[in-house]
Image (tube, grey):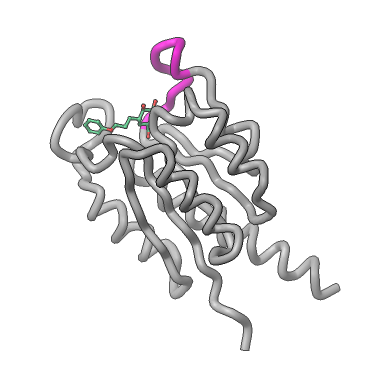
């Protein structure tokens, strides 16, 4: 029986406010709705879903993912634009990393056009609102599957 994959879905600062403000940018779904969406997208795989407003805690969880997860979906929120420490933590991972954003940062202010996280991400899903997470979890699981198949040939 194959091991059940574990997908860490980590969320950065202010995403706890989702659904309460700026619905024109981030939509009406709450973070609890997004978690439910990720669990549905995982189709039986285990989802570990967390949010923090603290950079160090996010980095601790990224480090934890290396030993406890098969893949990481990360919405770094504003830390994606600012945190070299987060990038360094991501560079130490050997599991697939899917960067995920509700909005499309490239279509917004210039300061959102830089993503340190992208330098370490396998791929990026952005601009689809809460559906970005559905796509990101599915992409992460596909990457896990591909790696497992490649390891058995
Ligand atoms: O589009 C995304 O998912 C972002 O990662 C969201 C970040 C932003 O800094 C990135 O540029 C793009 C902001 C998260 C804050 O979320 C809020 C949600 C509702 C109300 C207030 C903040």
Image quadrant of ligand 1 equals: top left
Task: Tell me if 41 is positioned left or right of 99 in this view.
Answer: left
Residue range highlighted in magenta:
103-112
Residue 6's place in the image compared with 123, above or below, is below
Task: Name the magenta segment's main secondary structure.
Answer: helix
Residue 36 appears in the picture as rendered: yes
Where's residue 77, x and y in %? 39, 33
- Residue lying at the far left in this picture: please name it: 20
Compare residues 134 and 16 and report the one nearer the observer: 16
- Residue lying at the far right in this picture: please name it: 153
Q: Quadrant of residue 144?
A: bottom right
Residue 128 appears in the picture as rendered: no
Q: Quadrant of the C terminus?
A: bottom right
Write the residue at 64% across / 38% down. 120
Tell me if residue 8 is in the magenta stretch.
no
Write the residue at 59% across / 42% down. 89
- Residue lying at the far bottom in this picture: please name it: 1
Q: Quadrant of residue 147?
A: bottom right
Q: Quadrant of the N terminus?
A: bottom right
Task: Tell me if 57 is positioned left or right of 53 in this view.
Answer: right
Where's residue 43, x and y in %? 44, 70
Residue 90's place in the image compared with 79, above or below, is below
Residue 42's place in the image compared with 60, above or below, is below
Write the residue at 37% across / 64% down. 39
Compare residues 13 and 121 and report the one nearer the observer: 13
Task: Tell me if 35 is positioned left or right of 120 in this view.
Answer: left
Compare residues 131 and 19 and report the one nearer the observer: 19
Where's residue 145, x and y in %? 65, 66
- Residue lying at the far top in this picture: please name it: 110
Where's residue 95, x and y in %? 64, 56
Q: Quadrant of residue 141?
A: bottom right
């Amino acid at each position: 029986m194959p091991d059940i994959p574990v997908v860490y879905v980590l969320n950065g600062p202010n995403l706890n406010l989702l659904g309460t403000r700026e619905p024109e940018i981030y939509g009406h779904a709450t973070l609890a709705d997004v978690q439910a969406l990720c669990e549905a997208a995982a189709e039986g795989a285990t989802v570990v879903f967390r949010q923090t407003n603290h950079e160090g805690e996010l980095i601790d969880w990224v480090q934890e993912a290396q030993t406890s997860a098969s893949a990481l979906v990360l919405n770094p929120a504003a830390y994606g634009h600012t945190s070299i420490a987060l990038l360094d933590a991501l560079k130490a991972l050997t599991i697939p990393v899917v960067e995920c954003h509700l909005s499309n940062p490239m279509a917004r202010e210039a300061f959102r056009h830089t993503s340190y996280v992208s330098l370490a991400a396998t791929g990026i899903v952005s601009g689809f609102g809460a559906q970005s997470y559905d796509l990101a979890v599915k992409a992460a699981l596909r990457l896990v599957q591909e790696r497992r198949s490649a390891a058995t040939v």
